Structures are given as C-alpha cells and as structure tokens.
Image (tube, rainbow, N blue to C red):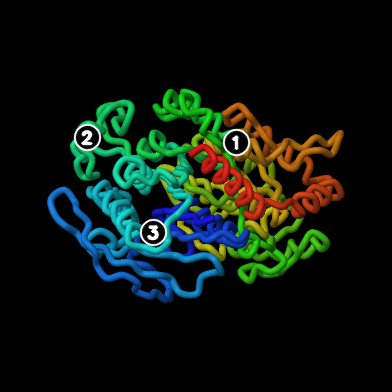
Amino acid sequence: MKILFIASEMVPYAKTGGLADVAGALPKALAALGHEVVVIMPKYKMEGNFEFERVYDNFPVQMLHSIEYAGVYKAKGTDKNLTVFFISNAKYFDREGLYQVRGIDFPDNCERFSFFCKAVMEYFKKSLFFPEVLHANDWQTALAIAYAKNIYNWKKTALVYSVHNLGYLGIFPKEQILQTGFDWNMFTPDALEFYDNLALAKAGFVFADVICTVSETYAKEIQTKEFGHGLDGLLRSRKDNLFGILNGIDYDVWDPEHDKQIVKNYNSSEINLKYANKKALQKANGLPQKQSIPLIGMITRLADQKGFDILSEALDNIMNLKCQLVVLGTGDQKYHSLLQEAKKKHPNNIGINLGFDSALAQLIYAGSDMFLMPSRYEPCGLGQLISFKYGAIPIVRKTGGLADTVHDYNPTTGKGDGFVFEEYSSDKLLDAVKRAIEMYENKKEWASIVKKVMCYDYSWKQSAAKYIDLYRKTLQKL
C-alpha cells in the first residue's frame, strides 16, 4: 500500500508536542509492515546535523496576492520503505519557531499552512508516487483533505484525517478564507465556517472519508458538549466514520534496559537497579537521597488542561504525605510562580525544572516511583505508556487515553496497574495519591505491580496494524 502521511512536525526534525512523536513513529511502523510510506512536512529552520538532498527545484504555488515558490528536499538515511520529504520556502518557514514566537502566534499562519498544503498537492501531481492513502494530521494539514476532495479529484485515494487534540482548531478571521484558495461558498456551517470565524480543522472533519483520534475513549468524548469544543454536533453526525486508535510508543527510544540517558540500565527482572536512577534524580533536584521516600514524577505542560488547577489546590496536602515531587515542563506563568513558591516552602520535597530537557525527562521516568497525570482531558497520553515501561506507576484521572490504558489497582484481587480518580477535583486527586503512597509501603506488592507493567506491550506495531486495517476498509468503500 502507498501511504502519504502529512504532518507539520516530526521527530527528530521539529517538535512542539505529541504530534511530532506520532509522525516520527507511526510511519516507521507502517513501513516496517512492508508498506511504502512517504512523510512530508515543512522545512523549518532546524537544529541538528541533518543531511538533505534537493529533489525538486522551485515550482510555483498560486497564493492570493502572489505566486510563491516551493522547493522539495529529501532526508538522507531513513528506514527501508520510508521516505521523508520537506517543502521549503524561506518566506514562510525560515524563521524561529514553528507556529509562534515568544508565545504569540504568527499572524500569517493561515497563509503559511495553506501554502504548505497547496505545495504538497502540486508536488504529487508531478511525482511518480501516487498515494492510495492520504493521512493528514491536525489543523495545519487539514486543507490537504479539502484540496484532494474538491480541487484535485483524488477519488481513488482514501482521505484520512487525525485529530490529536481538539482544543486546537486553527481558528482565523473569516476574511482569511480567501488565503486558502477557496471562495466564500466554502464559508458555511457545513464547510469551514465556525462561529463566524474560519476553522481550518473543519476541512478535515467535513471532507475526510474517515476521522481518527488517538484513543477510543477520546473518540467518544469529543462527541459530547463538554469535550467537543463546539464541534460535537458535526462529530456526532460523522460517528460512523469516527474511530479511535491508541498511540504507541517507540521502544527503540523508550526502554530502560538500553536507555543511554539514564544512570543505570535495568529491566523487569532486576528492578532493584532502578533505584540508582532515583538517587541520581533526587541529587539533581537537591532532594534528600532516600530510597524509602516515594518519588512522584511529572513531565507536562503547565496548564489547566493538564490538571494544574486541581494540583495547585492539593499540593500542600500532597507534600504533607512525606513524598517527593519532581516536575519538568513549561506553560502558564501563574503555574511557574506557584511551583517556585512551593519549592521555597517545601525545599526537601519538590524539584522544579521549568523548561524541557530530554535527558532529564528520561531520568524522571527511570527515577520515579509514580508518574502523575491529573489531566482534565487527555486525548491519548504517552507519559503513562512510557512510565509503564520504566516501572513508574501512573496516578491518573479517568479520561481519554488514560481511561483506556490505566486501570485502578485493587489490592484484594491484584488486578489493575495504576491509581485512578474520576471526579475532577483536588480532593479526589489527593485521595488517589494517598492510595498510591499507602500501597508503596507494601514493598512486595509494589514490586509485583512494577514487574507487571514493565512487561506491557504498547509498541507502534500493534497500532500500525489497526491503521492498515482502517485504510483497507476505507479503500473498499470508495
């Protein structure tokens, strides 16, 4: 099968969030199953020693007020059956940041990603590779679905649109509809209009043959008023073509037995070696180096969506449980300030790392006893899947992908693999943390939970097989 995967970011080339991880891993897993996969993304100003080959000189792309030019590059050294292309244009992509700078969105984002999607379609008019599946991701690439359906007449190609977080719809002033190349006839509630604005994500939701999201529970949640962000009616109308497929994780990257970023490698048969990483994590955060103290890790965006409003209310009470908390992430300034004040108040209990550091992230997974994700909503969540592999037991709210993967531990039956709360409140969060810490005191039972979760298989191979099945069923309906 020939698959074209369109994304605005992809590891290792450019990343702002989980989409980049998916774009870096899912196509690789599809290619490993024997399919011919092409990924295409913008050629940003990138950090890193990447080698590119120029494969197509500038070709014209008609924009609203001008003709712009696109070049095409190919990454060297990719896996068998996998090719990664880049669309270049200095005006649109040779700048600091992917979508914003210093927290402010670029004012020409609609124009930038309209250009990108047009350039993709124009290039594959010229290419010998013609896809059986076009798989677009999030609002930045949704227009490719609309172009394929309404302008380029790709009738024999299955059009698949994935939404990784419905909170980001690509909303712009309505006048920018003309930047997309469509006229005002496309500005209707049945097309791209959204409360008198333009929502680029609707190009995917309206025109795709199938819509995917990143967990079965989230696929149901986005059809509700609470989580539908104003599109629940449209998504309910498309429920027969709306599917949830859980993300996987790349065990070539996330495996404590071979992870070069951690202090001591270990596996499920020698979990006692994990504690060398705990000691290193405590030391790096200026915390007392005691194995007996339960250590909770968090790697997250500091935002209400991630549960920081209820965590802030519960934080002092959690610290009174005589545990340690290590946080890595950035986000809302109010939560930066709150954590900094908490560090002053509880210097022996909290480690604060306001930024992102990939090596520290891996040490947090390896050194933590528990991993906290109290999210208000969480489309899939990768943190809990990684924490399983590293033997850090998740404490989560029952929502989205967290509900699909983490099951509340029952000490009577021994069933379950984490500590789950459902009501979104600081009291219920605190209760879940208490239950986890109480269970931690039973070292034998805790070790049995750790060994169990470290053997789970959430690899991309399983998820990729489900995508192939969905692609085939979609093609059969065309």
Kindly identify the amino acid type of the residue bearing the numbered disc 2: Lys
Q: Nearer the viewer, residue 214 or 361?
A: 214
Q: Is residue 287 above or below residue 167?
A: below
Circle 1 sits in a helix, a strand or a loop, which is it?
A: helix
* Residue found at x 68% / y 40%: 406
- Which of the two discs, 3 and 1, labels the residue nearer the N terminus? 3
Instruction: Assess whether mark 1 and mark 2 are in contact (beta carbons under 8 angstroms).
Output: no
Quadrant the N terminus occupies:
bottom right
Where does label 3 land, which residue? 41
Q: CA distance from mark 3 to mark 2?
A: 26 Å
- Which of the two discs, 2 and 1, labels the residue nearer the N terminus? 2
Circle 2 sits in a helix, a strand or a loop, which is it?
A: helix
* Residue found at x 77% / y 54%: 455
Q: Position of residue 212 (x, y in %)?
A: 51, 40
Q: Position of residue 303 (x, y in %)?
A: 46, 42
* Residue found at x 58% / y 57%: 30
Q: CA distance from mark 2 to mark 1?
A: 33 Å
Q: Residue 216 has which mark?
A: 1
Where does label 2 land, which residue? 174
